[in-house]
Amino acid sequence: MDGQTGQTILYLGLIAMALVGVLGSFIPAIPGPSLVVLAVVIWGAVKGWALVTTALWVSIAVLVLSLLIDNLAGIIGAQKAGASQWGQIGSIVGLLLGFFGLLPALPIGGPLAGILLGPVLGAVVGEMLYRRTVPLVPRFKVSLKAALGILLGSIIGNVIQGLLALMAAIVFVGTTWNQAM
């Protein structure tokens, strides 16, 4: 295999990595925009940094925006739905317990289920504890509304992250395709 063929195979692998990064923006537990940045960095190390400057800056900006969106989307969704800080903290605790708690029990699919269900259940528990003086049925309704607000905010955040990661991947391919093919 000559050098050009090896670089072409590497480039196609990096495109695949960037696409996994786009999917990872939508699917919990798979790295998202950081994989796009990694693909650009590897290609820059192979071909030269001057050739990936635009793609590198765009992918880093997308990574930073994604981190902000990841942190703010759930909080904004929680606030819009009237969640307390207890519900927000419960959501974070539920996320961690869901991921690590279901990992040993269900090694395949368990962490994904835990990441999806844990924040909702954690938010409900947090809200139920916060509103413990409210009668049970109204307390549960308010708690469920807050949990769904957190979930909806997170889903909207993931969609935005996915679109940003897709944009970064398109910029990467668009600015480097002629170098590789």
Image: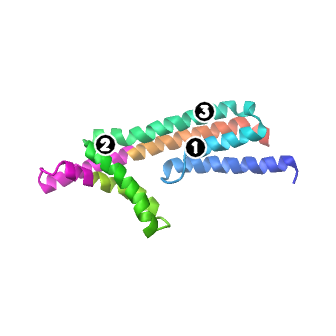
- Using the rendered image of the protein, determine whether residue 76 is visible from the camera's viewpoint: yes
- Report which residue position mark 2 lands on: 78
Cα separation, mark 1 vs mark 2, equals 26 Å
Residue 79: within the magenta?
no
Q: What stretch is highlighted in magenta?
A: 125-153
Tell which circle, 1 or 2, labels the residue nearer the N-terminal end: 1
Q: Name the residue under label 1.
A: 34
Three-letter amino acid code at the position of disc 3: Val
Q: What secondary structure is marked by label 1?
A: helix
Q: Badge 2, how many Cα within 10 Å: few under 14, some, many 20+?
A: many
Q: Which residue is drawn at 33% across and 50% down?
A: 91
Q: In this view, does 78 lie to the left or right of 17?
A: left
Judge depth for marks 3 and 1 and give the one in front. Answer: 1
Q: How far apart are marks 3 and 1 (CA)?
A: 12 Å
Residue under the image location 14 percent in, 56 percent down? 136
Q: Does the magenta stretch include residue 136?
A: yes
Quarter in which the N terminus is drawn: bottom right
State which tag comes first along the sequence, 3 or 1: 1
Q: Which of 170 and 71 is in front in this view?
A: 71
Tell whether 62 sits left or right of 55.
left
Q: Is residue 155 left or right of residue 131?
A: right
Q: Earlier in the sequence, mark 3 or mark 2?
A: 3
Task: Look at label 1 and name its amino acid.
Answer: Ser
